[in-house]
Amino acid sequence: MAGKRDYYEVLGVARDTDADAIKKAYRKLAIQLHPDRNKEAGAEEKFKELSEAYAVLSDAEKKARYDQHGHAGIDQQYSSEDLYRNINFNDLFGGMGGFENIFGQMFGGGRGGPARGRDLQTTHTLTLEEAFKGTEVDVTYWRLESCTPCKGSGAEPGSKVDTCPTCRGTGQVQRLARTAFGTLSQVTSCPDCAGAGRRIEKPCRTCKGSGHDRHRRTVTVSVPAGIESGQVLRMAGQGEVGGRGGPMGDLYVEVQVKPHERFERDGADLATEAFISFPEAVLGTTVTLEALDGPVKLEVPSGTPAGKVLRLRGRGMPHLRGAGRGDLHIAVRVAVPEKVSDKAKALLGELAAELGADATKMGKRKKGLFG
Ligand SMILES: [Zn+2]
Ligand SMILES: [Zn+2]
């Protein structure tokens, strides 16, 4: 076909390069050109070109034909499904995030090989004090693990296990699929052995042949100081066991922080209230508050109106990322006693007369009363 680039040039390797170096070159470039990571125009086309070059040069027979006859030798001989027949993309990129579905997305194919175990999710509730300090919590949950007696094989220990005749032990079968790029071969899990590659004569009694059983497990999760409700901690490899030696899934622990009786929270900032008397509001005072990290002194200046919010910088919650802490906001409340002594009544009467109309004047509205 005219216009096709030389396969060695596409992979950036010399003509006498060995199979291992070809594989390495392909992996390196494929990671750069992965359509999930590389959004440049034409990246997907380049990825296809690269994969075609690899399909040919990684196969001894195709490589020999290409070396002798060039593109014409390949294009006349192989359909696109023939071209990709022997590549196992899962082997090339197994365990590397974002490659599992690449051929599914690009060529409409499924993936073969051992399946990764399921991710699990659980929730853990903390107090605000725990979120303030950071803590370690034990999370207990059920998960599927490899069955102990049969070591995950699904066969009763000591019983006969044959190679699956359908997939000849590979656990994978190829099937043809029509896609936007033509008819291609897809590798999928063998339907007769579910990817195990074996035919079991006598299923394991413990797991009834599944190779899995459920266990209750406890993992210790390190919770960083400053965590907020709804944030999720990932425990890599603590999910369920994969099929046929596939990797374990992950455990996701969603954190909830209980409401606190004295503090409200907004990110790293905390808010609370301080009650003072009317004389204190007029004359000014010092109030000692119990913050999350111990007592803190708040200076209330003379003439502080009720509802005024004062701020103590750096006395809020720790920032989850980065150093320092948020602020502590304190709304000043003027306590109005319901019962007072006769003496206090008399003094307040005198005070009211002394202050006169000034004390009852209606204040000018600054903001909407409903916030
Ligand atoms: Zn099979
Ligand atoms: Zn078993």
Image (cartoon, helix red, strand yellow):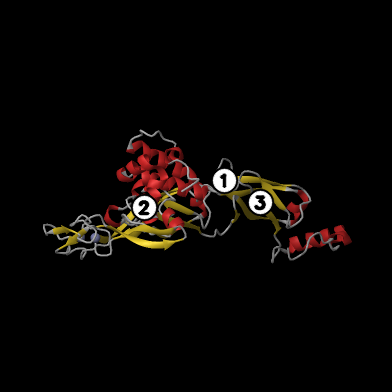
Which quarter of the rendered picture does the C terminus lie within?
Answer: bottom right
Element marked by disc 2: loop
Give coordinates of residue 106: x percent, y percent: 46, 56
Mark 2 highlights which residue? 78
Give coordinates of residue 297: x percent, y percent: 64, 45
Which sits in the foreground, 201 or 220?
201
Q: For the residues marked 2 and 1, what is the alpha-carbon distance in whole angstroms?
A: 60 Å
Mark 3 highlights which residue? 329
Local crowd size for mark 1, using a 10 Å CA cut-off: few (<14), some (14–19), many (≥20): some
Which sits in the foreground, 25 or 127?
25
Q: Which amino acid does label 2 sit on?
A: Tyr
Residue at 15%, 58% in the rendered image: 161
Q: Which amino acid does label 1 sit on?
A: His
N-terminal of the two: label 3 or label 1?
A: 1
Give coordinates of residue 194: x percent, y percent: 27, 62
Mark 1 highlights which residue? 319
Q: Which of marks 2 and 3 is in front?
A: 2
